[in-house]
Image (cartoon, rainbow, N blue to C red):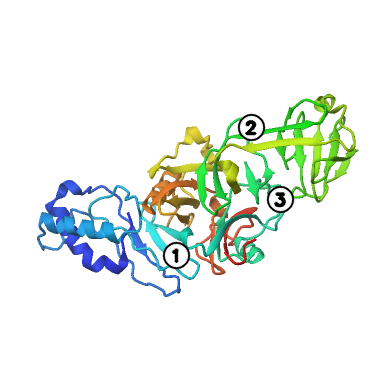
Amino acid sequence: MFVNLTSLRSFVPVLVATSLVFSSFANADAKIFKIKSKPVDDVQVSEEVSVPEADNAAAPKKQATKSDFFKKVEKLKKESASPKEPKKSAMVVESAKGAFDEYGISVEEKTFPKSSGDVPVHVLRVNLNAGKVVPKIVLAEGRLGSKATLTKICKNFGAVAAINGSFFDAKTYAAVGYLMIDGKPIQAPLIVKARTTFGIMSDGSVMVGKPKFRRRIRPEGEFFSMIDGINRKCSGGEIIIYTEEFGKSVTIPEGGLGFTFNGEGLVTGIVKGKANIPETGGLLLVTSNHVHRFKNTAEGTKIHFTQTLMSPWDKARDAFGSGMLLVSEGKVSFDQTREEVGKYLMGSASRTAVGITADNHLVMVVADGRGGSYKGVDFDEIAQIMVDCGCTDAIALDGGGSSTMVYNGEVLNTPSDKGGERKIANALVLIPAGAAK
């Protein structure tokens, strides 16, 4: 659904003419994309071209043969880097991908046409096969609850490029849903239902799916207990684990106990009231109705933690959840009911998404919203954009004022907040391979 500016002049006359001859290949009601390509060397392209509809009376009079038509189609297929061609009108030409820089990154600007106003779409494509950058999930200032603009986050971690990450609590800036960094669970997933998760494996490959989790705790000499959460506020009647990412201290509810433990899982202290969280290891908070399960847990007791991601997610290095599944097996798959998306999140807005192609290209997309001449896109539309970018699987990330894309220190999109960049809690960044830990 994208049009290649570099080849537009040579292909459009032939394709328009052939669409008139072979009308069975064209869909006059199909939406047509416009594209404004932005090479990575920042050469500005002022030309913006829209493709005429199939029934446009001003179409060239040149007559094409059926063989000419299929020759053009075959040529386009060979030139396209996308392994899976989305279903399109015969008039629509696959857009050329921007030149890759020394990090294997290309940047494009596209336009998604809507009756409410054409929406600017920013696409950052990473050739993971090149191994020049490492995708990484990071906390804004390296700790849970911290916040910073995406530009600042890139500086903090020496990132070449980045997009905003998963949804977060507007008051605490804690991530919503599952969060793992460097193989360490920072926040636990929802117990009732696994959410769609974006994961980066230990070998640098990426995955989208719904991992299954198993997490339990058992002090020596005690029974197994379920862990209700990691690094979040205790709502009562729960067992919560806190680590340094949460902060320096936490208050134990009345009647409850806190068990500090070291990196080997050995209990180092039993506390009440306000308790300090160790820099290594953590603190196990047990509310009053679960204290009886820990009556034999004393200092020096070994606590066995079991938090297992079932295969293949057990090989994940970084992961964050709470997003909405957009694309599966190369097809739009967003389902509001299945994803339990509230009505307040629906409708047109700025959207951020990330996906993967069959040829191992990471695709990061931001569609602008709430501009003077456009309102943004909905989930089905951002899903279609990801399909058109060649994604086999894709997930939506946080949107609205959080939607931001940075490349080489420059904000490529137009954030919808009046003040510009919004401070966010986490991000997906690209770090030069030599600098990544």
Q: Does the rendering let one see residue 234?
A: no
Res 421 quadrant in image: bottom right
* Residue type at numbered disc 2: Ile
The residue sitting at 44% across, 65% down in the picture is 106
Give the x, y percent position of residue 254.
87, 32
382 relative to 421, above or below: above
* Residue type at numbered disc 1: Val
The residue sitting at 66% across, 57% down in the picture is 140
Taking 433 as reference, is 47 left or right? left
* Element at label 1: strand
Q: Quadrant location of the C terminus?
A: bottom right
Q: Disc 2 to disc 1, how far (Cα)? A: 38 Å
Of label 2 and label 3, which has the lower sequence position?
A: 3
Give the x, y percent position of residue 417.
57, 57
Q: Disc 3 to disc 1, how far (Cα)? A: 31 Å
Taking 16 as reference, is 219 left or right? right
Q: What is the number of the mark on residue 107?
A: 1
Which residue position holds label 3? 144
Q: Disc 2 to disc 3, how far (Cα)? A: 20 Å
Give the x, y percent position of residue 35.
35, 62
Of label 3 and label 1, which has the lower sequence position?
A: 1
Q: Does the rendering let one see residue 381?
A: yes
Q: Residues within 10 Å of mark 1 (few under 14, many from 20)?
A: many
Of label 2 and label 1, which has the lower sequence position?
A: 1
Which residue position holds label 2? 191
Give the x, y percent position of residue 305.
74, 36
The residue sitting at 33% across, 57% down in the picture is 2
* Residue type at numbered disc 3: Leu
